Image (cartoon, rainbow, N blue to C red):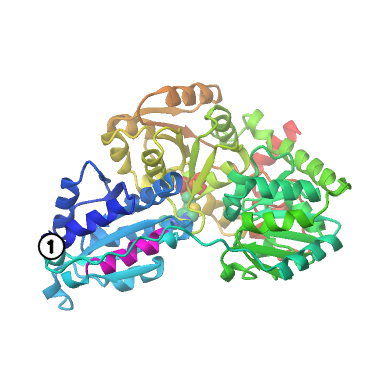
Amino acid sequence: MDQTVAEILVDQMVEAGIRKVYGIVGDSANPIVDALRKHQADIEFVHVRNEEAGAFAAGADSLVSNRPTAVLGSSGPGSVHLLNGLYDCQRNGASVFAIATHIPSAEIGTGYFQETKPEFIFEHCCNYVGTISSAAQMPRISELAIQAAVLGRGVGMVIVPGDISAARVEHELVKRPLIKSRPVIRPTDADLDRAVDMIGAAEKIVVFGGDGTRHARAEVLELAGRLHAPVGYAYRGKDVLEADNPGAVGMTGLLGWGGITEALGHADLVLMLGTDFFYHAFLPSDPRIIQVDDDPSHLGRRASVDLGLTGDVGETLRALLPRLAQRTDRSFLDRIVKHHQTDVERLQTYVNHEGSGQGLRPEMVASALSDLATNDAVFTIDTGMCNVWAARYLHMKPGRRLLASFGHGSMANAMPQAIGAKIGSPDRQVIALCGDGGLSMLMGELLTAAGLDVPVKLMVFNNSTLGMVRAEMMVVGYEPWGTDVKNPDFGAVAAACGLHGERVVDAGDVRPAIERAFAHEGPALIDFVTDPRALSMPPSTTLEQVKGFALTTSKLMFSGDVAEVWQQAKSNIRDVGQVL
Ligand SMILES: Cc1ncc(C[n+]2csc(CCOP(=O)(O)OP(=O)(O)O)c2C)c(N)n1
Ligand SMILES: [Mg+2]
C-alpha cells in the first residue's frame, strides 16, 4: 500500500460516483487538493468564492443530478463558512460528502491558530461526523461518511487534520461496498384495510403532498382521479403535483394561494402524502387525516393524525389503488376547482396591471419568467418575497424543477444553488429568482459564474429592502426599521464582473430583457427595479373560511384576506380598486 490518506479519500469519492467537489483551498487541505489535481479527469474541483456558496451549490447539484457531490473547507474559518450551506443541504435531503480539514493533529486542544471544534459545530447538520485522527482509520471513517450522505440523503462529514491526510497508509485496505439501494417500505395489509375503510367513510377527500411524492406522481394523480379529490401541495411538492394536473388547487401555508385552504376547511378526510409540512397551524383540526411517509418520525409530528402509514408513497399507493373503486360524485372537486380558478384570476391583477407604486410589479416579472422559461427549466428561489412570487406565478410543467432553501430558510441560496444546478445539469436552463438582499449577501459568486462560465440566468427582484421582514414588521404593527438597503445598479455590477448585465425599470422592457438574458450564451443578470410596497395579493380566503385553523394575523398575511394587510398596503388597494 503506497497511498496517502488524501489519495485514498479521493479514490473513494470517485468510486462513490462523486464528480464535483465545491470549495476553496487552504493549507490544511493541500494534500487533498493535490490528490484532486491528479484526478482531474475523474473529479472536478469547483473553485467558489465562499465555502457557504460551495455547500449551497453542492446540494443543488446533487438534487438535480441525482449523484452525491462533495464540499471542501479548510481548517477554522474555511470550514466554518460551510456551515450554513450544509444546513441547507441536510434539510433539503441532498447527498453531500463534506470534508472539513483541521489544524495539525499535535496542536488540537491547545488553542492553536484557527482552532475550532468542528465535531461540535457540525454535529447537528450532518447525518454523520467522523474524525480521521490516524492513517490506521482509513478507509473506514470516510466510507461511513460517504455512506451516510448517499443512503441517508443528507450530509456525511469527515474532519481530517492536514498532517493526517498527508500520511501514508501502511496497512492493506479492507473496503466495504457502498450501499446505494434503499429498501422498499410499505404498510401492512391490515393498515391498508384501515385506510380503505376511512376513505370509504369519507365524502370530501383532499390530497396534500410534498417532496415524498416526487417519484410517485402518476400514482398520486391516479388516486386523486379515483377519489375526485382536489390536490394541494407543500412548496416542495409544487413542481411534482401542480404540473399538468387539472385537480391541482395550490398551496397552503405562509405562501399559500388557491383553492386548497377552502378544500382543507371543508374536507372530512385529508390524505397527507410524503410531506412533513412545518406549518401545522395551517393544517385543519376537524377532518380525519391519513399520513403516508417513508420516515416514521414524520408521522403525526405536525398534524394530529388518525392513521399513520410508514411507506414509500409510490409503493403504498400501488398497494392501495386496487382496493379503491372509482367514485362518481365530483361535486366537491368541481366546487374547489372553481374556487381555485377565481383565486388564480384574482392573482393575475398585477400580471396584467403595472400598478401605481414605485417600480415594477414583481408578479409581472415572475409571470414573464414562467412564460419564457423552457419546459424543463430549473428555478432556484431566494428566501424572502421571491418565494411568494415563485409559489404563485411560476407555473410548473412536468419537466420543471423548483429548488429553494425549503427547510432551512436561508437567504442568499438562489444564486449558488443555480450555479450548482447548472453544473449538475448542464443541458437544462437554470434561472435564479434573487432578492436584492439575498444576491448581495453572497455577491462574490457572480465571479464564480463569470470565471467558470456557468451560464445561469440571475433575475434580481430589487426592491431596495429586505421586503419579507419589512412586511412581517408591518403586519404585527412594528414600524419597518433596519430593512431598507442602498443598492447599486446590479446589472452594471454584473457587467463589470463579466456577465451579461442589464437593469430594467419599465414594464415594457421586462420581457425583451428576459429574452436577451435567456438567449445570451453565458451567465446573465437582470436587475428588475421592483416596487418595495408590493405585498403578496391575498387570495379570496376569508376569516370565516379559515375557521378551525390556528392562524395568527401574521400567518394570515400571505394567505388570508385580512383587513390589516389591506390597510397597510395602500398602493396595492388603490390598484386593486382600479382593476377589479
Ligand atoms: C441568512 C439569513 N439572514 C436573515 C434571514 C431573515 N430574513 C428572511 S427573508 C429576509 C429578507 C430578504 O430580503 P431580500 O433578499 O431583499 O428579499 P425580499 O423579501 O425583499 O424580496 C430576511 C432578512 C434569513 N432568512 N437568512
Ligand atoms: Mg429585497
- Residue 23 in sight in this render: yes
Q: Magenta span covers which residues?
A: 138-150
Residue furthest out toward the bottom: 109
Residue at x-position 29% and y-position 30%: 498
The quadrant of the image that shows the C terminus is top right
Task: Judge whether 335 appears above or below 138 on screen.
Answer: above
| Residue 561 in sight in this render | no
Q: In the rendered structure, which amino acid carries the disc numbered 1?
A: Met
Determine whether, in the image, residue 163 is placed left or right of residue 233: left
Mark 1 lies within 8 Å of ligand 1 (Cβ measured): no
Q: Which residue is at a point 30% across and 43% down the rendered structure image? A: 444
Task: Say which quadrant the N terminus sits in.
Answer: bottom left
Secondary structure mostly seen in the magenta stretch: helix
Frontmost residue, 361 versus 20: 20
Quick one: SS at disc 1? loop
Which is nearer the eye, 550 or 437? 550
Report x, y in % for residue 516: 44, 22
Label 1 Cα neighbours within 10 Å, binned few <14 / some 14-19 / many ≥20:
few
Q: Nearer the viewer, residue 150 or 162?
A: 150
Residue 138 locus on image (x, y percent): 22, 67
Q: Quadrant of residue 367?
A: top right
In terms of depth relative to the viewer, which is nearer, 513 or 522? 522
Residue 284 x %, y %: 74, 63
Pointer 1 residue:
1
| Residue at image point 49% right, 60% down | 182
550 displayed left or right of 128 = right
Above or below, 121 relative to 376? below
The stretch drawn in magenta includes residue 143: yes
Residue 129's x, y, as percent? 33, 69
Q: Is residue 257 magenta?
A: no
